[in-house]
Amino acid sequence: MNYEEDAIRKALDIIRADPYMGGAVSFLDGDPFAGLEEYEMHSSISKVDDVDELLLDLRNYAGTFMLRVDDSRYLFFVNTAHYGCFVIAYINGEARDFENLTISREYLNEIRRLIERMIRLAKESETVEEFTKRYLDI
């Protein structure tokens, strides 16, 4: 199985199905081009190599960013202009959105710690369910 291709496909399915990430909420709020804009913004996924590059991109751009944790684990950061940054975890063939971050300069150190924790937990978890429960301390 090519985990990277599967991860991208599953992340895009989640993005398109979510009313905030997919643009439906913006459309209902009066933006007639919201769905098209969101589709264009999130249909191409930018790969980032490390947390520093990810934080720089999240501070400056809307779009979808993929951080490879290992061969079968990926984190996707779907940064929207209006609704924050949604995070999707992909672990061993399963994907789920589980977090929404507010990206701002004053909280970058806290966001860095959260992302580093996500990476550590993704490496330690065998399933998305296990990852999500551990991340949310359930």
Image (cartoon, helix red, strand yellow):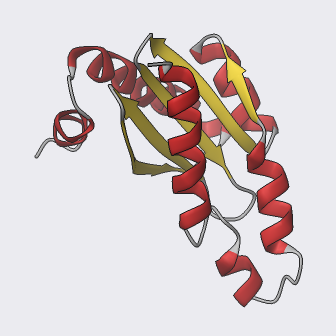
Q: Nearer the viewer, residue 39 or 118?
A: 39
Q: Residue furthest left?
A: 138
Give residue 127's quadrant in the image.
top left
Snapshot quadrant of residue 18: bottom right
Q: Position of residue 76 (x, y in %)?
A: 55, 35
Residue for point 32% across, 22% down: 122
Q: Residue 107: x percent and y percent?
A: 55, 37
Residue at (32, 25) in percent of width and height: 92
On screen, 46 above or below 63? above
Q: Is residue 27 left or right of residue 103?
A: right
Q: Is residue 5 visible?
A: yes
Left or right, 105 with respect to 17, comes to: right
**Outermost front residue:** 1
x 25%, y 41%: residue: 132
Position of the N terminus by quadrant: top left
Residue 30, image x and y in percent?
81, 89
Viewer-side residue, 66 vs 112: 66
The answer, for residue 107, to whether it is visible in the render is no
The residue located at (68%, 18%) in the rendering is: 48
Image side of residue 26 versus residue 33, left or right: left
